[in-house]
Amino acid sequence: MSDEKKLEELRVVIARHKRRDLMFLIAGVLALMIALLTFIALFTQMLIDGAPRLSWEFFTSFPSRRPESAGILSAWVGTTLVMLVTAISAIPLGVAAGVYLEEYAPKNLFTELIEINVTNLAGVPSIIYGLLALGLFVYQLGLGQSILAAGLTLALLILPIVIVATREAIRSIPVAIREGSYALGATKWETVADHLLPYSAPGILTGIIIGLARAIGETAPIITIGALTFIAFLPPSPIKSEFPFISFEWLTAPFTVMPIQMFNWVSRPEEEFQFNAAAAGLILVVMTLAMNALAIYLRYRMRKKIKW
Amino acid sequence: MYSKNVKSTWEKKDRSTGNLRYSYRRHLKEKFIELLLLLAAFFSILITFSIIFMLVKESIIFFQHVSIWEFLTDTQWTPLFDDAHYGILPLVSGTVVSSVIALLVALPLGTTIAIYLSEFASYTVRETAKPFLELLGGIPTIVYGYFALLFVTPLLQLIIPDLPGFSLLSAGLVMGIMIIPYVSSMTEDAMRSVPMHLREGSYAMGATKFQTAIKVVMPAAFSGIAAAYILAISRAVGETMVVAIAAGMQPNLTWNPMEPAATITAYIVQVSLGDLPHGSIGYQTIFAAGLTLLLITLIFNILGHLLRKRYRETY
């Protein structure tokens, strides 16, 4: 009798715990849903407000005081040029630093210092990079509020991302590959350049894309260096009709970028400008989502394809 | 026959000395490349030093005008007015309130998602949900700012009718949702790195999934989870655009989330939008504010880094 009673009690306890399990399962799904639903709300809100503004004219017009004729021509041209500077300066530097830390660096205090430093830099708020750029690039080096200054600022910002991605990609290559290369008489650099870098290229590329997607949406550091919000002209063309055909004048030109243009529209009181902001935001989100999705896809394919 | 042999040995010798010269050149090239790579790695340290140097340099000039005591205790922050006050407290209160709201949203939700994904969800659910969360983390913060101002604030005004158009509450809420992916992915990583046999032991004793998650996996992953939380704090404190857009940019010493207020980051944005001459006291205030921000985030970052290192070493 008492045994049966105990069994009964035990069943109650088990049922209670199973209920808790189920309740948590529901809580987990709900939490996940909240995150996803927020994104859906965000996207639909922008789609409803912004989609009617999306037209060919929106991409080919300069900003204007009249909301219905304002466009993002100078903004997307600016974003493209700034990203060009960022990519050209951050990729070689970041990959080189990653290769050094993973393949060359001896295990000592100095290396550890660099490692801690890179982790720390990744956690520094982006606006601090803006202050550094304001003091260093804009005034100390006299670059002014130029495309070059903005591109370099964002390059500093994404450098830790590129370094970490490079290191992780190189680390995942088995030692046997290196040993095989050395056994054939290759030097360290030959091993790196002919084997490690090509094999880790997809991983590094993933990191670069994620870094650039982050840089495209960065607003705070660009505001801090004092980018203008109203630009109704394009920077000088990099291609010239006469010798030497290439000009670097655009590097020193004043500019605006997509997030700055959006911020400018958001902070205006007139409601029509909010629709422009929504349209610009929509383009930004689609761009960053596409880049991130590409990176995730690359990583997924890499994992599936590579079997060492 | 003989001469041919001699010739071939000569050839051999020639080639070998050539090889020596070649290998010397190769060695030089190797060293040169190593030096270049070292310089690239060293560059990251240079960035840190120039950040500290810039902030400290301008802040020193600022603190020659304003005493540190005034900076830390004055309750007004009006550096651009004729009657200038330089108390950082109003900016700190705005930063603290918005960050606390953000963390109240992000930590419970992020942790729940992490536990669900790591302990409950099937392989397919996990592999589909994780990239989606990652995508959410990639959305530009300015877009979240727009969302806070034009979607969340009107929504909240339906529930709280006298909520002003700018408020710390709506900025904090959106900021919280923004850092959920950050918290959940790091917490999940920490929980996944707990060895399987601990879970198996717990299940063998008859524990449910929930009991195993709370009583076995989470304590084992404690330092990793703590690191995730601390890094989330530093992220919330340094977040700029959401608060600059949705919380207003008026310095306001308040602990009430229903009011508009400026954070440290929003103040820097506000000053940068204006046309402050280089070298003026207003210009220096943003560096002093930036230094305060850097110090706060640095403490959290170092703490988080130490904790993360600990859990990596354990397993």
Image (cartoon, coloured by chain):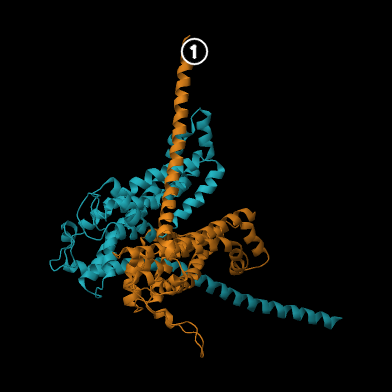
Q: Say which quadrant the C terminus of chain A sits in.
A: bottom right
In the rendered view, would you say B24 is above or below A6?
A: below
* Residue bearing mark 1: A4
Question: Percent position (x, y) of residue B9?
Answer: 77, 78
Mark 1 belongs to which subunit?
Answer: A
For mark 1, give the secondary structure: helix
Q: In the displayed image of the protein, which residue is found farthest to the left? A: B83
Circle 1: is it few (<14), some (14-19), or many (20+) Cα within 10 Å?
few
Residue sitting at the far right: B1
The color chain A is rendered in? orange
> Is residue A170 toward the left or the right of residue B258 in the image?
right
Q: Does any portion of residue A155 appear in the rendered image?
A: yes
Q: Where is residue A59 shown, x and y percent of the image?
A: 45, 71
Question: What's the residue at 43%, 70% (across, down)?
Answer: A58
Q: Position of residue B308 (x, y in %)?
A: 42, 49
Given residues B7 and A61, the one toward you in this image is A61
Residue type for callout 1: Glu
* A231 up-or-down from A299: above or below: below
**Which image quadrant for residue A103?**
bottom right
Task: Please state the horizontal and vertical placement of residue A233, each as a whole percent of the image.
Answer: 39, 79
Colour of chain B as rendered: cyan
Compared with A260, B73 (above or below) is: above
Which residue is drawn at the image coordinates 33% and 45% (left, top)?
A: B104
**Residue A101 in view:** no
- Nearest the viewer among B237 and A254 is A254
**Count of picture labels:** 1
Task: Single out the residue that lies furthest toward the top.
Answer: A1
B6 lies left or right of B213: right
